[in-house]
Image: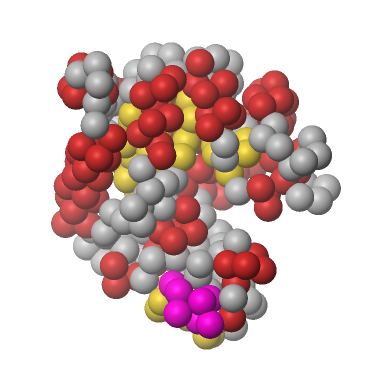
């Protein structure tokens, strides 16, 4: 195994607060105008290291991280970095160093632990692409596809879990199916490490099977940050991973239901 193939715990040291601040300056007017983005609940955000666990939305163009980080940095400043656990593909090619410098790190247990123990905030989307491409008709369902590793990550690092739910991202186009059956038929897991081949309908290409990629419609996106969960205080010194995961998903589902109940119209919000 080469150095480039192994988890790069040096990703943490590459964070550049100056570049990140300039990026937020560019992203802020776009997010606040095009998506009319809102982040609620940051008043209860805990000090020190924290694992933010979110639902993932928006297919090929997810806005969850930019929307959260713009408001987070506005409130807490750039000396408190936000790291996002990301797929290796994000670091391939010439854009890899840019993503590392703005807080994206390889999704490994080592990277997460290093970032959390340094006092950083780490964002994880347990459902990954499976969640980001959920059908629009199931947009308000929390489904991590059985993935629970985030719980062990928080326990090992001794940090709270901060659930965060977002609504609106699955309205940026009409997501029809994850296409798991099609991905299996084509052998994509072996070729591309993917269990899905999503089918969607949007602008400007109409029906798309991941390519050509349609542009996101200007749906209003709202993120609700929930109260932190102190795992040891709530579940004891030897917490059961399944029990913690069930609780996290339960409070997230309740919060998402509440956001959905207040949402009057698709896209408009």
Is 145 drawn above or below residue 206 in the view shown?
above
Q: Position of residue 24 (x, y in %)?
A: 60, 36
Which residue is found at the position 32% from the left and 45% from the top? 165
Please state which of residues 140 and 198 is positioned toward the viewer in this rendering.
198
Q: Quadrant of residue 156?
A: top left
- Quarter the N terminus occupies: top right
The answer to whether residue 116 is seen in the rendering is yes
Q: Quadrant of residue 164?
A: top left
In the image, taking residue 232 as reference, residue 78 lies left or right, namely right
Q: Position of residue 251 (x, y in %)?
A: 20, 41
Is 223 drawn above or below residue 200 in the view shown?
above
Q: Tag count in the figure? A: 0
The range drawn in magenta is: 178-185
Which residue is found at the position 28% from the left and 35% from the top? 241
Which residue is found at the position 18% from the left and 22% from the top? 234
Please state which of residues 117 and 242 is positioned toward the viewer in this rendering.
242
- 183 falls in the magenta region: yes
Predominant SS along the magenta part: helix
- Quarter the C terminus occupies: bottom left
The answer to whether residue 23 is seen in the rendering is no
Q: Position of residue 198 (x, y in %)?
A: 50, 74
Which residue is found at the position 64% from the left and 77% from the top? 212
- 253 falls in the magenta region: no
Q: Position of residue 162 (x, y in %)?
A: 33, 30
């Amino acid at each position: 195994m080469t150095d480039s193939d192994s988890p790069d715990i040096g990703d943490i040291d590459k964070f550049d607060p100056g570049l990140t601040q300039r990026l937020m300056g560019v992203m802020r007017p776009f997010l606040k105008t095009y998506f009319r983005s809102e982040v609620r609940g940051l008043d209860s955000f805990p000090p020190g290291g924290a694992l933010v666990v979110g639902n993932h939305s928006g297919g090929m163009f997810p806005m969850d991280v930019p929307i959260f980080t713009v408001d987070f940095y506005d409130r807490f400043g750039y000396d408190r970095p936000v790291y996002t656990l990301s797929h290796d593909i994000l670091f391939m090619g010439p854009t890899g160093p840019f993503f590392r410098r703005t807080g994206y790190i390889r999704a490994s247990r080592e990277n997460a632990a290093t970032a959390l123990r340094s006092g950083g905030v780490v964002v994880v989307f347990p459902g990954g692409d499976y969640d980001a491409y959920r059908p629009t008709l199931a947009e308000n369902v929390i489904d991590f596809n059985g993935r629970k590793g985030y719980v062990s990550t928080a326990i090992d690092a001794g940090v709270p879990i901060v659930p965060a739910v977002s609504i609106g991202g699955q309205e940026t186009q009409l997501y029809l199916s994850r296409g798991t059956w099609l991905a299996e038929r084509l052998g994509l897991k072996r070729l591309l490490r993917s269990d899905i081949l999503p089918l969607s309908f949007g602008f400007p290409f109409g029906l798309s099977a991941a390519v050509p990629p349609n542009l996101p419609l200007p749906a209003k996106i709202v993120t609700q940050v929930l109260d932190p969960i102190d795992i040891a205080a709530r579940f004891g010194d030897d917490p059961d991973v399944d029990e913690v995961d069930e609780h996290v998903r339960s409070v997230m589902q309740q919060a998402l239901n509440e956001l959905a109940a207040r949402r009057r119209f698709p896209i408009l919000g």
